[in-house]
Image: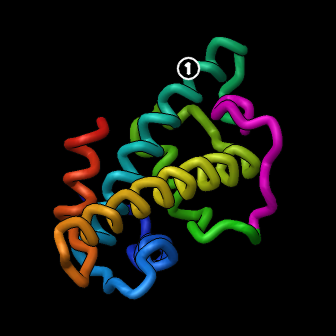
């Protein structure tokens, strides 16, 4: 499976939490894959909500968001988020811009939480680098 999300913004999210720790490319890739999987799952649920309302366009409220943040406040790029949203839903659905931004906001919060925990795991392992195993350990412990 290819990863739609570029690793650089994911790496930046990890670095925001890492302090003096380094971040391996593997950690950014592992988190990008997890973000993509989570986004695709959320889009499936949102498509179900839109269908129940008789719509073919996903909107922010389908993702459980009442107020959409400003696009400029986000680290994750919108175009890959749009592709992630469409990965596992039928082609008949459209994704409104506010839905893309809402999903990016949700996924960014998700990434920050995972990155924060991965940093703690790297510290606990007495390493100077956040690695993919820290990301995967988080998921094995908390999901």
Horizontally, is 19 left or right of 127 in the view?
A: right
Looking at the picture, tell me which residue is in the foreground, 124 or 138.
124
Looking at the picture, tell me which residue is in the foreground, 135 or 41.
135
Residue plotted at (17% across, 62% down): 133
Q: Is residue 6 visible?
A: yes
Measured from the top left, where is residue 90 in percent x and y?
47, 32
Residue range in magenta is 60-71
User: Which corner quadrant of the image does residue 118 belong to?
Assistant: bottom left
Quadrant of the rendering where the C terminus is positioned: top left
Measured from the top left, where is residue 74 in percent x and y?
67, 66
Looking at the picture, tell me which residue is in the foreground, 78 or 122.
122
Measured from the top left, where is residue 30 in percent x and y?
27, 62
Residue plotted at (31% across, 81% down): 23
The number of callouts visible is 1
Q: Is residue 82 visible?
A: no
Residue plotted at (45% across, 82% down): 19
Quadrant of the rendering where the N terminus is positioned: bottom left
Residue 47 in the magenta stretch? The answer is no
Instruction: Give the SS element for disc 1.
Output: helix
Say above or below: 108 vs 47: below
The residue labelled by disc 1 is 48
| Mark 1 neighbour density, 10 Å: few (under 14) some (14–19) many (20 or more) | some
């Amino acid at each position: 499976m290819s990863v739609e999300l570029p690793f650089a913004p994911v790496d930046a999210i990890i670095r925001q939490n890492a302090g003096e720790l380094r971040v391996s490319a593997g950690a950014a890739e592992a988190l990008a894959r997890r973000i993509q999987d989570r986004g695709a799952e959320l889009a499936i649920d949102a498509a179900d909500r839109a269908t129940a309302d008789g719509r073919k366009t996903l909107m922010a409220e389908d993702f459980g968001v009442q107020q959409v943040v400003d696009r400029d406040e986000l680290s994750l790029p919108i175009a890959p988020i749009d592709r992630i949203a469409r990965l596992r839903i039928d082609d008949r659905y459209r994704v409104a811009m506010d839905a893309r931004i809402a999903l990016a906001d949700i996924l960014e919060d998700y990434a920050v939480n995972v990155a924060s925990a991965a940093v703690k795991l790297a510290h606990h392992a007495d390493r100077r680098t956040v690695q993919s195993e820290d990301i995967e350990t988080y998921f094995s412990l908390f999901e």
